[in-house]
C-alpha cells in the first residue's frame, strides 16, 4: 500500500511538471510566445512595445534567412513538434504549407472576420484555403511592382523624366518595347537588367500561371501566362533590350549604382535596398506605375499560428495588434520599409506625404499604393518555387544561345517530373 501511495504521488508530480511545462510560462509568470520571422522587419520593436502594453506576455523573436526559416518550419510541422507559437510565411511558400491545414489554427475561429475589411481583398483571399472557410494567416507586407527608371538615361534618350509623364508614355506592352528600342538606339544601354525581370513582368500579375486550384498543370494550355511571360522575355532578349545581370550579385549592384540599364521592374521593398546599397544613384531614380499588363505583386508574407501552440488566443491578439493599420504604418516607416496591405494606411497623411530623398524627394508611396489596389488574386500552387526556377533555367540557356522552343519543351518535361513525384 505504501509503495502504491509513493508511486501515485510520483505520477501526480510528473503530471504537475508537465502541466507547468505546457503552460510555457517564464519564471516571472509571463506567457512566452515564440515568434519566427525572416528577413528585415521591425517586428522585434513591435514585440517589445506590445510587451510594455501587456505585462503578462513575453515574445521571443527568432530571425533567420528566408530558406533556412521555411525549411525549419516545414520540418517542425512535418514532425508535429517544434513549431513556434507564431510564424511568418513568405507568399511563394504559402501554398506548399497549406497542404498541412491541420497544423495551423483557423484564424476565422479567433475572430479574424471582424478585421477582414481592413486589408486588400486579393491579399486576404490568398491567406485562405480553396474553400474560403479557413484562414491560415493575417496579411503583412506586400510587393506591388513599379518602374524604377534612371532619369539620366531617359534624358539621354530624349524621353520625359517626370513620373506622370513616363506613366503616360508607357501605357501598354507595345509602348514599353518602343521606349526600350529608343533607349537602346540613343544610349546603347539595355532597357532591363535581365531576362528574369522581363519574365516576371508578366508572370507576377498572372491570376493563374502554373496550376489551377485543383492542382492541374496549366502551362501547355493555349494562351497560358507562363508561356506568354517566357515569350516576352525571349522577345526583349532578341531585340537587345535585356542584359545578363543576376539580381543581388556584386555585378548587378554595380550596374544599379552606375546606371548601366534604364529600368528595374521592382517591388516596393526594393527601395530600401537601393537607398542603402547604391549611393552613387541617389537622386537618379524615379518611380512610375507600370502598364496594367505588366503590373503585379512580387513578395510579401503572412503571419500564422501553428496548431501546436498552447496560447492561440494570446498569439492572435498580438498579431492582430501588430498588423493593424497603425502598426503597418510603423513597419512602413521603419528601416525595413514593409509596404502595407492594410488599405487604411494609404489614406493616412503620414503615408501620403512621405518623401523619398533617394528618389529626388518624390513621394513614391502613392505610386505603389495605386499599383497595390490594381492587383488581382493570384494562385501559385504548392510547387511554385521549384517549377518557377525551371523556367528561369530555360531563359538563362536561351540567353546563352539555346533555341527558345527547345528550352521551353525541356522545361515543361522537367516541370512534369517535379509535379508527378
Image (spheres, rainbow, N blue to C red):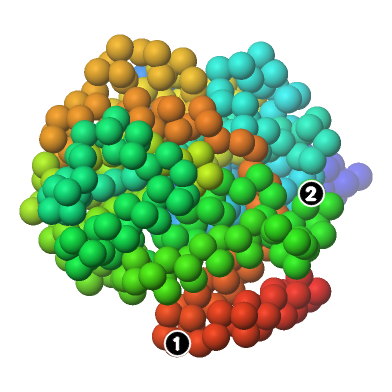
Relative to residue 174, is residue 112 drawn left or right?
A: right
What residue do we see at 51% from left, 39% from top? 292
Mark 2 Cα-neighbour bin, 10 Å: few <14, some 14–19, many ≥20: few
| Viewer-side residue, 201 vs 63 | 201
Provide residue 100's location: percent of width, then percent of height.
76, 51
Residue sitting at the far right: 1
Provide residue 264's location: percent of width, then percent of height.
32, 53
Relative to residue 267, is residue 119 drawn left or right?
A: right
Mark 1 Cα-neighbour bin, 10 Å: few <14, some 14–19, many ≥20: few
Instruction: Reply above or below: 407 against 137.
Output: below
Secondary structure beneath dot 1 equals loop
Secondary structure beneath dot 2 equals loop
Q: Which mark is residue 213?
A: 2
Quarter in which the N terminus is drawn: top right
| Viewer-side residue, 142 vs 190 | 190
Q: CA–CA distance between discs 2 and 1?
A: 36 Å
What residue do we see at 34% from left, 36% from top? 167
Mark 2 vs 1, N-terminal side: 2
Quarter in which the C terminus is drawn: bottom right
Residue sitting at the far left: 280
Q: Which mark is residue 401?
A: 1
Provide residue 61's location: percent of width, then percent of height.
42, 42
What residue do we see at 60% from left, 60% from top? 228
| Viewer-side residue, 115 vs 31 | 115
Relative to residue 375, is residue 150 drawn left or right?
A: left
Relative to residue 268, is residue 190 drawn left or right?
A: left
Task: Check if mark 2's residue and mark 1's residue have beta carbons within 8 Å.
Answer: no
Quadrant housing residue 118: top right
- Asked if one can make out residue 271 in the rendered structure from this viewpoint, the answer is yes
Instruction: Reply above or below: 200 against 172.
Output: below
Amino acid at each position: 500500500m505504501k509503495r502504491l501511495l509513493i508511486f501515485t504521488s510520483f505520477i501526480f508530480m510528473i503530471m504537475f511538471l508537465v502541466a507547468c511545462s505546457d503552460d510555457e510560462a517564464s519564471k516571472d509568470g509571463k506567457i512566452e510566445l515564440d515568434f519566427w520571422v525572416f528577413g528585415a522587419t521591425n517586428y522585434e520593436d513591435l514585440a517589445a512595445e506590445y510587451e510594455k502594453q501587456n505585462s503578462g506576455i513575453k515574445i521571443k523573436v527568432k530571425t533567420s534567412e528566408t530558406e533556412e526559416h521555411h525549411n525549419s518550419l516545414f520540418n517542425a510541422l512535418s514532425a508535429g513538434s517544434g513549431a513556434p507559437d507564431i510564424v511568418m510565411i513568405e507568399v511563394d511558400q504559402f501554398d506548399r504549407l497549406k497542404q498541412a491545414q491541420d497544423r495551423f489554427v483557423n484564424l476565422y475561429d479567433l475572430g479574424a472576420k471582424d478585421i477582414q475589411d481592413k486589408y486588400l481583398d486579393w491579399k486576404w483571399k490568398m491567406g485562405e484555403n480553396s474553400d474560403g472557410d479557413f484562414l491560415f494567416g493575417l496579411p503583412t507586407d506586400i510587393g506591388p511592382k513599379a518602374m524604377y527608371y534612371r532619369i539620366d538615361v531617359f534624358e539621354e534618350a530624349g524621353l520625359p523624366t517626370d513620373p506622370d509623364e513616363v506613366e503616360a508614355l508607357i501605357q501598354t506592352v507595345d509602348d514599353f518595347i518602343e521606349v526600350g528600342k529608343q533607349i537602346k538606339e540613343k544610349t546603347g544601354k539595355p532597357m532591363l537588367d535581365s531576362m528574369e525581370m522581363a519574365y516576371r513582368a508578366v508572370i507576377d500579375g498572372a491570376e493563374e500561371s502554373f496550376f489551377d486550384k485543383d492542382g492541374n498543370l496549366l502551362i501547355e494550355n493555349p494562351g497560358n501566362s507562363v508561356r506568354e511571360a517566357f515569350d516576352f522575355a525571349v522577345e526583349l532578349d532578341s531585340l537587345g533590350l535585356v542584359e545578363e545581370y543576376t539580381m543581388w550579385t556584386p555585378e548587378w549592384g554595380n550596374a544599379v549604382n552606375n546606371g548601366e540599364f534604364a529600368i528595374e521592374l521592382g517591388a516596393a521593398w526594393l527601395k530600401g535596398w537601393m537607398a542603402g546599397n547604391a549611393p552613387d544613384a541617389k537622386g537618379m531614380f524615379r518611380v512610375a506605375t507600370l502598364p496594367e499588363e505588366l503590373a503585379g505583386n512580387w513578395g510579401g508574407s503572412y503571419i500564422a499560428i501553428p496548431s501546436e501552440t498552447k496560447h492561440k488566443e494570446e498569439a492572435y491578439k498580438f498579431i492582430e495588434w501588430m498588423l493593424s493599420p497603425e502598426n503597418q504604418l510603423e513597419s512602413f516607416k521603419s528601416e525595413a520599409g514593409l509596404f502595407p496591405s492594410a488599405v487604411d494606411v494609404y489614406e493616412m497623411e503620414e503615408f501620403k506625404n512621405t518623401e523619398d530623398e533617394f528618389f529626388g524627394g518624390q513621394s513614391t508611396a502613392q505610386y505603389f499604393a495605386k499599383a497595390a489596389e490594381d492587383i488581382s488574386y493570384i494562385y501559385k500552387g504548392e510547387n511554385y518555387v521549384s517549377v518557377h526556377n525551371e523556367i528561369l533555367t530555360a531563359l538563362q540557356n536561351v540567353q546563352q544561345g539555346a533555341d527558345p522552343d527547345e528550352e521551353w519543351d525541356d522545361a515543361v518535361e522537367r516541370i512534369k517530373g517535379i509535379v508527378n513525384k
